[in-house]
Image (cartoon, rainbow, N blue to C red):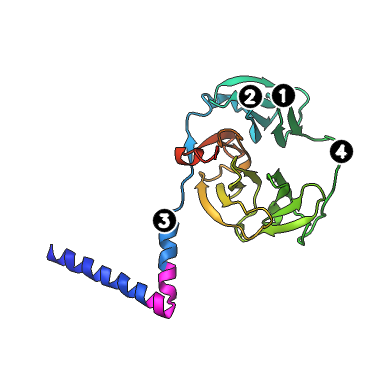
Amino acid sequence: MARFWVCAAGAGLFLAFLLLHSRFCGSPVLRNFAFKISWRTEKILYRLDVGWPKYSEYFTGTTFCVAVDSLNGLVYVAQRGDNIPKVLVFTEDGFFLRSWNYTVDTPHGIFAASTLHEQSVWITDVGSDFMILWLRGENGTGPAKFNIPHSVTVDSAGRVWVADRGNKRIQVFDKDTGEWLGAWNNCFTEEGPSSVRFTPDGQYLIVAQLNLSRLSILAAPPVGSIGDCSVISTIQLADQVLPHLLEVDRKTGAIYVAEIGAKQVQKYAPLNSYVSSFGS
């Protein structure tokens, strides 16, 4: 017992020495030590909802994308494959409602934009035509150039965030003019982002990295500044799950992830302590 207290006292003296040395000599030792502590206390904001969906047998193809109709409480999943329903519709609680296999051939992305008077679902497919309001970029590595632009979202300040997957960065543009505002690349040294979405409160960006099977939660910058990328938390998925595209429920904050490796969609629910901030 005496040996324990001697060791504890020695550890306390050692930490006190580090504090004093850092205060007066600027020692990097304590900074490294503090980094290790902060890494172990990473903020946890989400948990896997193991009960969603109620029956995974409806996933019969490769699940490429997912969209959430928060107004009507619906989740749309688009999958690829032969002789299968291309679009599946679930409730937010995970109950299967219906499917269809017409007007869609090879879905890649999906977006739900419902109003009080109309339900609207948009699907990117081979041969789809759209009216171009502004066009930015060409293949390359410089500002406003792209290498596999894979996902896009818009924040409340009218900034367009593009997951430039091949260049391992997120680029930001003005929604109305297309002006290049900046880029984030310091968070993506291992692999570029494949999907990007904002949380309902606008405080965070949720980013998927396909081959790392990882979701990262990044701090959103204030209006008028892009700044540098800062990782708040990460969710490490199983190997070869391959999160392709994700969507965030604008009402509940839940994250739905389309996994082309696991051929399924999983739901991550925000913790209660974080949900309370959505209405603030």
Tag 1–tag 4 contact (CB < 8 Å): no
For mark 4, give the secondary structure. loop
Mark 3, residue position:
40
In the displayed image of the protein, which residue is found farthest to the front? Answer: 280
Question: Height in image: 67 above or below 240?
Answer: above
Mark 2 and mark 1 in contact? Answer it, CB < 8 Å: yes
Q: CA distance from mark 1 to mark 3?
A: 44 Å
**Disc 2 or 3, which lies upstream in sequence?**
3
C-alpha distance separating marks 2 and 1: 8 Å
Kind of residue at badge 1: Gln
Callout 2 environment at 10 Å: few (<14), some (14 to 19), or many (20+)? few
Give the magenta-colored segment's residue range. 21-32
Q: Nearer the viewer, residue 223 or 274?
A: 223
Instruction: Give the total of numbered labels.
Output: 4
Please give the name of the residue rendered at 60% of the width and 24% of the height, measured from the top-left corner: 90
Q: Quadrant of residue 279?
A: top right
Look at 46% across and 37% down and name the residue there: 272
Q: Using the rendered view, name the quadrant where residue 26 is placed.
A: bottom left
Sequence order check, earlier mark of 1 and 3: 3
Amino acid type, residue under disc 4 in the picture: Met
Q: CA distance from mark 4 to mark 2?
A: 27 Å
Q: Residue at x 62, y 29 (%)?
A: 70
Give the residue number, with chain letter if any, for mark 4.
131
Question: Residue 61's image quarter?
Answer: top right
* 209 on left or right of 11: right
Report which residue position mark 2 lands on: 72
Task: Say what amino acid the circle numbered 3 marks.
Answer: Arg
For disc 1, the marked residue is 119
